[in-house]
Image (cartoon, rainbow, N blue to C red):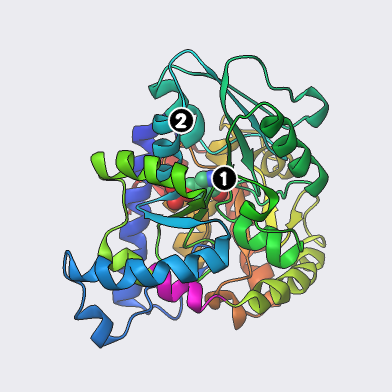
Amino acid sequence: MIINNSLDEVKKRENALSIIKDWVLNKSRESLYDLTGLSGGFIASPSEINLLETYVGPAIFEEELQNVGIEHMGGEKVLPLNRTSSGILATILTLVDEGSNVVHYLAQLPAHPSIPRSCALVNANYSETDNFEEFSIPDNTSLVVVTGSTMDHKVIDLDNFKKVIEMAHERDIPVMVDDASGARLRTVVFNQPKACDLGADIAITSTDKLMPGPRGGLMSGREELIDNIKVKVNQFGLEAQPPAVLAMLNGIKNFNGDNLIKSFSRKDELFDLLNENFTYFKPTPTGVMIAPEDLAREISASHNLSDKDLAFVFSFILLKEHGIITIPPVSMPGASATIRFDLSTSDAFNLDLGDLNKKIVSSFNNLEKIVINEDKCREIVFTF
Ligand SMILES: *Cc1c(COP(=O)(O)O)cnc(C)c1O
Protein backbone atom coordinates (compact mmCIF):
# COMPACT_ATOMS: atom_id res chain seq x y z
CA MET A 1 0.00 0.00 0.00
CA ILE A 2 1.23 3.46 -0.86
CA ILE A 3 -1.38 5.80 0.60
CA ASN A 4 -2.41 4.41 4.01
CA ASN A 5 -3.57 7.35 6.10
CA SER A 6 -4.19 11.09 6.29
CA LEU A 7 -0.50 11.83 6.85
CA ASP A 8 0.36 10.04 3.59
CA GLU A 9 -2.27 12.18 1.89
CA VAL A 10 -0.77 15.37 3.28
CA LYS A 11 2.67 14.24 2.06
CA LYS A 12 1.53 13.36 -1.45
CA ARG A 13 -0.17 16.76 -1.65
CA GLU A 14 3.04 18.53 -0.63
CA ASN A 15 4.84 16.64 -3.38
CA ALA A 16 2.18 17.53 -5.95
CA LEU A 17 2.50 21.21 -5.06
CA SER A 18 6.31 21.01 -5.48
CA ILE A 19 5.83 19.47 -8.94
CA ILE A 20 3.38 22.22 -9.90
CA LYS A 21 5.68 24.95 -8.62
CA ASP A 22 8.61 23.54 -10.57
CA TRP A 23 6.47 23.31 -13.71
CA VAL A 24 5.32 26.91 -13.46
CA LEU A 25 8.81 28.27 -12.72
CA ASN A 26 10.73 26.18 -15.25
CA LYS A 27 8.15 25.77 -18.02
CA SER A 28 5.08 28.00 -17.87
CA ARG A 29 1.66 28.30 -16.29
CA GLU A 30 0.09 28.10 -19.77
CA SER A 31 1.46 24.60 -20.35
CA LEU A 32 -0.25 23.27 -17.20
CA TYR A 33 -3.82 22.02 -17.49
CA ASP A 34 -5.88 22.32 -14.36
CA LEU A 35 -8.81 19.99 -15.05
CA THR A 36 -9.92 19.68 -11.43
CA GLY A 37 -12.94 21.91 -11.91
CA LEU A 38 -11.64 23.88 -8.92
CA SER A 39 -10.13 27.01 -10.33
CA GLY A 40 -9.30 28.95 -7.17
CA GLY A 41 -9.56 32.22 -9.04
CA PHE A 42 -8.84 35.58 -7.45
CA ILE A 43 -10.51 38.31 -9.44
CA ALA A 44 -9.82 41.71 -7.86
CA SER A 45 -8.93 45.20 -9.04
CA PRO A 46 -6.04 47.19 -7.48
CA SER A 47 -8.47 49.64 -5.88
CA GLU A 48 -10.38 46.76 -4.29
CA ILE A 49 -7.14 45.23 -3.04
CA ASN A 50 -6.27 48.54 -1.37
CA LEU A 51 -9.41 48.20 0.76
CA LEU A 52 -8.40 44.81 2.18
CA GLU A 53 -7.86 45.91 5.75
CA THR A 54 -9.05 43.81 8.68
CA TYR A 55 -12.17 45.90 9.32
CA VAL A 56 -12.62 48.03 6.21
CA GLY A 57 -12.57 44.96 3.94
CA PRO A 58 -15.52 43.19 5.58
CA ALA A 59 -17.40 46.47 5.93
CA ILE A 60 -17.36 46.94 2.18
CA PHE A 61 -17.30 43.45 0.68
CA GLU A 62 -19.39 41.45 3.15
CA GLU A 63 -22.19 43.93 2.75
CA GLU A 64 -22.17 43.56 -1.02
CA LEU A 65 -21.80 39.79 -0.74
CA GLN A 66 -25.19 39.71 1.04
CA ASN A 67 -26.97 40.78 -2.14
CA VAL A 68 -24.85 38.89 -4.65
CA GLY A 69 -24.71 35.74 -2.49
CA ILE A 70 -28.46 35.65 -1.86
CA GLU A 71 -29.06 36.00 -5.58
CA HIS A 72 -26.73 33.02 -6.21
CA MET A 73 -27.89 30.81 -3.32
CA GLY A 74 -31.37 31.99 -2.33
CA GLY A 75 -32.14 32.24 1.39
CA GLU A 76 -32.39 35.22 3.72
CA LYS A 77 -28.78 35.79 4.73
CA VAL A 78 -25.36 34.53 3.62
CA LEU A 79 -22.23 33.78 5.63
CA PRO A 80 -18.78 33.51 3.98
CA LEU A 81 -16.55 30.75 5.35
CA ASN A 82 -13.00 29.51 5.08
CA ARG A 83 -14.17 26.30 3.39
CA THR A 84 -17.35 24.32 2.79
CA SER A 85 -16.05 21.93 5.46
CA SER A 86 -15.93 24.86 7.93
CA GLY A 87 -19.59 25.59 7.26
CA ILE A 88 -20.53 21.94 7.73
CA LEU A 89 -18.59 21.80 11.00
CA ALA A 90 -20.13 25.04 12.30
CA THR A 91 -23.67 23.92 11.43
CA ILE A 92 -23.19 20.59 13.21
CA LEU A 93 -21.58 22.25 16.26
CA THR A 94 -24.57 24.59 16.45
CA LEU A 95 -27.52 22.32 15.72
CA VAL A 96 -26.54 18.79 16.73
CA ASP A 97 -26.73 17.60 20.34
CA GLU A 98 -24.60 14.86 21.80
CA GLY A 99 -26.28 11.45 21.40
CA SER A 100 -28.81 12.70 18.82
CA ASN A 101 -29.13 11.32 15.29
CA VAL A 102 -27.99 12.88 12.04
CA VAL A 103 -29.27 11.24 8.86
CA HIS A 104 -27.95 11.98 5.39
CA TYR A 105 -29.37 11.21 1.98
CA LEU A 106 -27.17 11.51 -1.11
CA ALA A 107 -27.34 10.24 -4.69
CA GLN A 108 -24.24 8.07 -4.32
CA LEU A 109 -21.98 7.17 -1.40
CA PRO A 110 -19.67 8.30 0.05
CA ALA A 111 -20.46 11.63 1.71
CA HIS A 112 -17.83 14.30 2.04
CA PRO A 113 -15.72 13.24 5.08
CA SER A 114 -16.28 16.56 6.87
CA ILE A 115 -19.87 15.46 7.64
CA PRO A 116 -19.13 12.19 9.53
CA ARG A 117 -16.04 13.76 11.12
CA SER A 118 -18.02 16.72 12.48
CA CYS A 119 -20.72 14.40 13.81
CA ALA A 120 -18.07 12.29 15.56
CA LEU A 121 -16.72 15.45 17.20
CA VAL A 122 -20.05 16.17 18.90
CA ASN A 123 -20.73 12.46 19.65
CA ALA A 124 -23.80 12.26 17.43
CA ASN A 125 -25.00 9.07 15.73
CA TYR A 126 -24.46 9.57 12.04
CA SER A 127 -25.84 7.49 9.19
CA GLU A 128 -25.85 7.98 5.44
CA THR A 129 -27.56 6.19 2.57
CA ASP A 130 -27.85 6.48 -1.19
CA ASN A 131 -30.86 4.17 -1.27
CA PHE A 132 -33.92 6.40 -1.09
CA GLU A 133 -36.22 3.50 -0.14
CA GLU A 134 -34.06 2.89 2.91
CA PHE A 135 -33.94 6.52 4.02
CA SER A 136 -35.89 7.27 7.18
CA ILE A 137 -35.72 9.77 10.00
CA PRO A 138 -35.56 8.14 13.45
CA ASP A 139 -36.68 9.72 16.73
CA ASN A 140 -34.24 12.10 18.36
CA THR A 141 -32.89 13.37 15.04
CA SER A 142 -31.39 16.85 15.26
CA LEU A 143 -30.33 17.40 11.65
CA VAL A 144 -31.13 16.01 8.22
CA VAL A 145 -28.38 16.36 5.62
CA VAL A 146 -28.80 16.25 1.85
CA THR A 147 -25.96 16.39 -0.69
CA GLY A 148 -27.01 18.19 -3.86
CA SER A 149 -24.16 16.88 -6.00
CA THR A 150 -21.57 14.43 -4.69
CA MET A 151 -17.78 14.75 -4.82
CA ASP A 152 -17.95 12.77 -8.08
CA HIS A 153 -20.69 15.06 -9.42
CA LYS A 154 -23.59 12.66 -9.09
CA VAL A 155 -26.64 14.90 -8.89
CA ILE A 156 -29.60 14.19 -6.62
CA ASP A 157 -33.00 13.35 -8.09
CA LEU A 158 -35.24 16.38 -7.63
CA ASP A 159 -38.27 14.42 -6.39
CA ASN A 160 -36.18 12.65 -3.75
CA PHE A 161 -34.67 15.99 -2.74
CA LYS A 162 -38.14 17.48 -2.20
CA LYS A 163 -39.38 14.41 -0.34
CA VAL A 164 -36.45 14.40 2.12
CA ILE A 165 -37.04 18.08 2.92
CA GLU A 166 -40.75 17.42 3.39
CA MET A 167 -40.10 14.43 5.69
CA ALA A 168 -37.75 16.53 7.84
CA HIS A 169 -40.04 19.53 8.03
CA GLU A 170 -43.05 17.43 8.99
CA ARG A 171 -41.08 16.76 12.16
CA ASP A 172 -39.62 20.26 12.55
CA ILE A 173 -36.07 19.07 11.90
CA PRO A 174 -33.73 21.46 10.07
CA VAL A 175 -32.21 20.45 6.72
CA MET A 176 -28.62 21.25 5.75
CA VAL A 177 -27.72 20.89 2.08
CA ASP A 178 -24.11 20.20 1.11
CA ASP A 179 -24.30 21.95 -2.26
CA ALA A 180 -20.53 22.29 -2.78
CA SER A 181 -20.70 21.92 -6.56
CA GLY A 182 -24.46 21.41 -6.67
CA ALA A 183 -25.38 25.07 -6.25
CA ARG A 184 -24.24 25.52 -9.86
CA LEU A 185 -24.30 22.01 -11.36
CA ARG A 186 -27.85 21.25 -10.22
CA THR A 187 -29.27 24.63 -11.10
CA VAL A 188 -27.51 25.42 -14.38
CA VAL A 189 -27.08 22.01 -16.01
CA PHE A 190 -30.07 20.17 -14.48
CA ASN A 191 -32.43 23.15 -14.13
CA GLN A 192 -33.17 22.36 -10.49
CA PRO A 193 -34.20 25.14 -8.09
CA LYS A 194 -31.79 26.61 -5.55
CA ALA A 195 -31.62 24.54 -2.35
CA CYS A 196 -33.07 27.36 -0.22
CA ASP A 197 -35.94 27.80 -2.67
CA LEU A 198 -36.71 24.10 -2.19
CA GLY A 199 -37.01 24.75 1.54
CA ALA A 200 -33.50 23.91 2.79
CA ASP A 201 -32.82 25.70 6.08
CA ILE A 202 -29.08 25.87 5.42
CA ALA A 203 -27.19 25.40 2.15
CA ILE A 204 -23.43 25.60 1.68
CA THR A 205 -21.51 25.88 -1.55
CA SER A 206 -17.82 25.82 -2.39
CA THR A 207 -16.77 29.07 -4.06
CA ASP A 208 -14.09 27.49 -6.23
CA LYS A 209 -16.12 24.63 -7.63
CA LEU A 210 -17.29 25.26 -11.19
CA MET A 211 -16.92 29.03 -10.69
CA PRO A 212 -13.96 31.44 -10.84
CA GLY A 213 -13.68 32.03 -7.10
CA PRO A 214 -11.27 31.24 -4.26
CA ARG A 215 -11.27 28.11 -2.11
CA GLY A 216 -13.96 29.01 0.37
CA GLY A 217 -17.47 28.25 1.51
CA LEU A 218 -20.62 30.30 1.19
CA MET A 219 -23.54 29.46 3.44
CA SER A 220 -27.06 30.71 2.96
CA GLY A 221 -30.32 30.04 4.71
CA ARG A 222 -32.77 31.17 7.35
CA GLU A 223 -31.53 34.29 9.07
CA GLU A 224 -32.13 33.07 12.60
CA LEU A 225 -30.13 29.88 12.02
CA ILE A 226 -27.36 31.70 10.15
CA ASP A 227 -27.00 34.10 13.10
CA ASN A 228 -26.60 31.22 15.56
CA ILE A 229 -24.13 29.44 13.31
CA LYS A 230 -22.22 32.69 12.81
CA VAL A 231 -21.53 32.81 16.56
CA LYS A 232 -19.77 29.41 16.37
CA VAL A 233 -18.03 30.39 13.14
CA ASN A 234 -16.53 33.47 14.79
CA GLN A 235 -15.74 31.67 18.05
CA PHE A 236 -13.68 29.05 16.25
CA GLY A 237 -12.21 31.19 13.46
CA LEU A 238 -14.03 29.43 10.63
CA GLU A 239 -15.05 32.60 8.79
CA ALA A 240 -13.64 33.71 5.44
CA GLN A 241 -11.07 36.48 5.70
CA PRO A 242 -11.43 39.76 3.74
CA PRO A 243 -9.31 38.72 0.71
CA ALA A 244 -11.38 35.57 0.24
CA VAL A 245 -14.62 37.51 0.70
CA LEU A 246 -13.61 39.96 -2.03
CA ALA A 247 -12.67 37.13 -4.40
CA MET A 248 -15.92 35.25 -3.64
CA LEU A 249 -17.91 38.34 -4.47
CA ASN A 250 -16.13 38.81 -7.81
CA GLY A 251 -16.13 35.07 -8.51
CA ILE A 252 -19.91 34.93 -8.21
CA LYS A 253 -20.32 38.09 -10.29
CA ASN A 254 -18.15 36.51 -13.00
CA PHE A 255 -19.80 33.11 -12.88
CA ASN A 256 -21.01 32.18 -16.33
CA GLY A 257 -23.31 29.20 -16.61
CA ASP A 258 -22.65 28.99 -20.38
CA ASN A 259 -19.25 27.41 -19.67
CA LEU A 260 -20.93 24.63 -17.72
CA ILE A 261 -23.44 24.06 -20.49
CA LYS A 262 -20.70 24.05 -23.14
CA SER A 263 -18.66 21.47 -21.21
CA PHE A 264 -21.83 19.41 -20.85
CA SER A 265 -21.83 18.82 -24.63
CA ARG A 266 -18.03 18.73 -25.13
CA LYS A 267 -17.56 15.92 -22.62
CA ASP A 268 -19.31 13.49 -25.01
CA GLU A 269 -16.56 14.05 -27.58
CA LEU A 270 -13.86 13.20 -25.03
CA PHE A 271 -15.86 10.24 -23.75
CA ASP A 272 -16.13 8.78 -27.28
CA LEU A 273 -12.38 9.18 -27.87
CA LEU A 274 -11.51 7.47 -24.59
CA ASN A 275 -13.85 4.60 -25.36
CA GLU A 276 -11.61 3.62 -28.26
CA ASN A 277 -9.02 2.47 -25.70
CA PHE A 278 -10.85 2.08 -22.41
CA THR A 279 -13.95 0.35 -21.11
CA TYR A 280 -14.65 1.89 -17.73
CA PHE A 281 -14.44 5.67 -18.07
CA LYS A 282 -17.77 7.30 -17.26
CA PRO A 283 -19.20 10.64 -18.27
CA THR A 284 -19.88 13.26 -15.58
CA PRO A 285 -22.09 16.30 -16.20
CA THR A 286 -19.08 18.42 -17.19
CA GLY A 287 -16.35 15.92 -18.12
CA VAL A 288 -15.31 12.30 -17.74
CA MET A 289 -14.06 10.28 -14.81
CA ILE A 290 -12.61 6.98 -13.79
CA ALA A 291 -13.18 5.64 -10.28
CA PRO A 292 -10.33 3.75 -8.53
CA GLU A 293 -12.09 0.36 -8.82
CA ASP A 294 -12.75 0.97 -12.53
CA LEU A 295 -9.14 1.94 -13.14
CA ALA A 296 -8.15 -1.36 -11.51
CA ARG A 297 -10.37 -3.20 -14.01
CA GLU A 298 -8.55 -1.54 -16.92
CA ILE A 299 -5.16 -2.87 -15.76
CA SER A 300 -4.12 -6.24 -17.09
CA ALA A 301 -0.71 -6.53 -15.37
CA SER A 302 -0.70 -8.24 -11.97
CA HIS A 303 0.29 -6.09 -9.01
CA ASN A 304 -0.22 -5.55 -5.26
CA LEU A 305 -1.51 -1.99 -5.27
CA SER A 306 -4.87 -1.02 -3.84
CA ASP A 307 -7.42 0.56 -6.19
CA LYS A 308 -6.86 3.93 -4.56
CA ASP A 309 -3.09 3.63 -4.91
CA LEU A 310 -3.55 3.00 -8.63
CA ALA A 311 -5.59 6.21 -8.89
CA PHE A 312 -2.90 8.18 -7.10
CA VAL A 313 -0.07 6.76 -9.23
CA PHE A 314 -2.00 7.36 -12.47
CA SER A 315 -2.87 10.92 -11.53
CA PHE A 316 0.73 11.66 -10.55
CA ILE A 317 1.92 10.33 -13.94
CA LEU A 318 -0.56 12.65 -15.68
CA LEU A 319 0.78 15.53 -13.62
CA LYS A 320 4.49 14.80 -13.95
CA GLU A 321 4.54 13.89 -17.63
CA HIS A 322 1.85 16.13 -19.06
CA GLY A 323 1.15 18.86 -16.53
CA ILE A 324 -2.45 17.65 -16.21
CA ILE A 325 -3.78 18.46 -12.75
CA THR A 326 -6.61 16.30 -11.46
CA ILE A 327 -7.89 16.21 -7.90
CA PRO A 328 -6.16 13.13 -6.35
CA PRO A 329 -2.61 14.57 -6.22
CA VAL A 330 -3.68 17.89 -4.71
CA SER A 331 -6.70 16.89 -2.60
CA MET A 332 -7.17 17.12 1.15
CA PRO A 333 -7.15 13.89 3.23
CA GLY A 334 -10.23 11.74 2.74
CA ALA A 335 -11.34 13.28 -0.54
CA SER A 336 -12.46 11.02 -3.37
CA ALA A 337 -9.62 9.37 -5.34
CA THR A 338 -11.72 9.32 -8.50
CA ILE A 339 -9.87 10.93 -11.38
CA ARG A 340 -12.10 13.48 -13.07
CA PHE A 341 -11.20 15.44 -16.18
CA ASP A 342 -13.42 18.49 -15.87
CA LEU A 343 -13.95 20.58 -18.98
CA SER A 344 -15.78 23.49 -17.36
CA THR A 345 -12.92 25.72 -16.26
CA SER A 346 -10.67 28.04 -18.25
CA ASP A 347 -7.69 25.71 -18.86
CA ALA A 348 -10.01 23.29 -20.66
CA PHE A 349 -11.53 25.81 -23.07
CA ASN A 350 -8.65 25.79 -25.53
CA LEU A 351 -7.68 22.19 -25.00
CA ASP A 352 -7.61 19.92 -28.05
CA LEU A 353 -9.57 16.88 -26.88
CA GLY A 354 -7.71 14.56 -29.28
CA ASP A 355 -4.47 15.68 -27.68
CA LEU A 356 -5.87 15.20 -24.16
CA ASN A 357 -7.00 11.69 -25.13
CA LYS A 358 -3.48 10.85 -26.35
CA LYS A 359 -1.96 12.08 -23.10
CA ILE A 360 -4.36 10.01 -21.03
CA VAL A 361 -3.61 6.89 -23.11
CA SER A 362 0.15 7.42 -22.89
CA SER A 363 0.00 7.95 -19.11
CA PHE A 364 -2.09 4.81 -18.75
CA ASN A 365 0.44 2.79 -20.76
CA ASN A 366 3.14 3.98 -18.40
CA LEU A 367 1.00 3.03 -15.43
CA GLU A 368 0.65 -0.49 -16.85
CA LYS A 369 4.43 -0.71 -17.08
CA ILE A 370 5.23 0.38 -13.54
CA VAL A 371 2.44 -1.16 -11.42
CA ILE A 372 4.55 -4.26 -10.88
CA ASN A 373 7.20 -2.13 -9.19
CA GLU A 374 5.78 -0.83 -5.92
CA ASP A 375 8.91 1.12 -5.00
CA LYS A 376 8.82 2.99 -8.27
CA CYS A 377 5.13 3.76 -7.72
CA ARG A 378 5.87 5.09 -4.25
CA GLU A 379 8.60 7.26 -5.69
CA ILE A 380 6.21 8.78 -8.24
CA VAL A 381 3.73 9.74 -5.54
CA PHE A 382 6.09 10.98 -2.81
CA THR A 383 9.21 12.27 -4.48
CA PHE A 384 9.64 15.12 -6.78
C1 LIG B 1 -15.62 19.73 -2.23
C2 LIG B 1 -16.74 19.25 -1.42
C3 LIG B 1 -16.82 19.58 -0.03
C4 LIG B 1 -15.74 20.31 0.72
O1 LIG B 1 -15.31 21.54 0.23
P1 LIG B 1 -14.02 22.19 0.93
O2 LIG B 1 -13.99 23.58 0.37
O3 LIG B 1 -12.86 21.38 0.52
O4 LIG B 1 -14.22 22.17 2.38
C5 LIG B 1 -17.93 19.12 0.65
N1 LIG B 1 -18.89 18.40 0.06
C6 LIG B 1 -18.85 18.08 -1.26
C7 LIG B 1 -19.97 17.28 -1.86
C8 LIG B 1 -17.76 18.48 -2.03
O5 LIG B 1 -17.71 18.14 -3.33
Q: Quadrant of the C terminus?
A: bottom left
- Where residue 42 appears, x then y in whole percent? 37, 73
Magenta stretch, main secondary structure, is: helix
> Can residue 369 be seen here?
no
The residue at the point 41 percent across, 36 percent down is: 89
**Secondary element at image label 2:** helix
Where, by quadrant of the figure, is residue 75 drawn? bottom right
**Secondary element at image label 1:** strand
Please, is residue 135 above or below residue 362 in the view?
Answer: above
Cβ(mark 1) to ligand 1 < 8 Å?
yes
The residue at the point 31 percent across, 46 percent down is: 238
Please, is residue 239 above or below residue 250 in the view?
Answer: above
Give whichever of 262, 200 is nearer the camera: 200
The magenta segment: 248-255
Residue mark closest to the camera, 1 vs 2: 2
What amino acid type should be assigned to the residue bearing mark 1?
A: Asp
Give whichever of 61, 246 is nearer the camera: 61
- The residue that label 2 is drawn on is 95
- Where residue 64 appears, x then y in whole percent? 39, 72
Give whichever of 269, 103 is nearer the camera: 103
What amino acid type should be assigned to the residue bearing mark 2?
A: Leu
253 falls in the magenta region: yes
The residue at the point 76 percent across, 43 percent down is: 162
The residue at the point 78 percent across, 38 percent down is: 163
Please, is residue 257 above or below residue 279 in the view?
Answer: below
Give whichever of 26, 175 is nearer the camera: 175
- The residue that label 1 is drawn on is 178
Q: CA distance from mark 1 to mark 2?
A: 15 Å
250 falls in the magenta region: yes
- Where residue 98 appears, x then y in whole percent? 43, 16
- Where residue 211 appears, x then y in whole percent? 53, 69
On residue 347, the disc is none
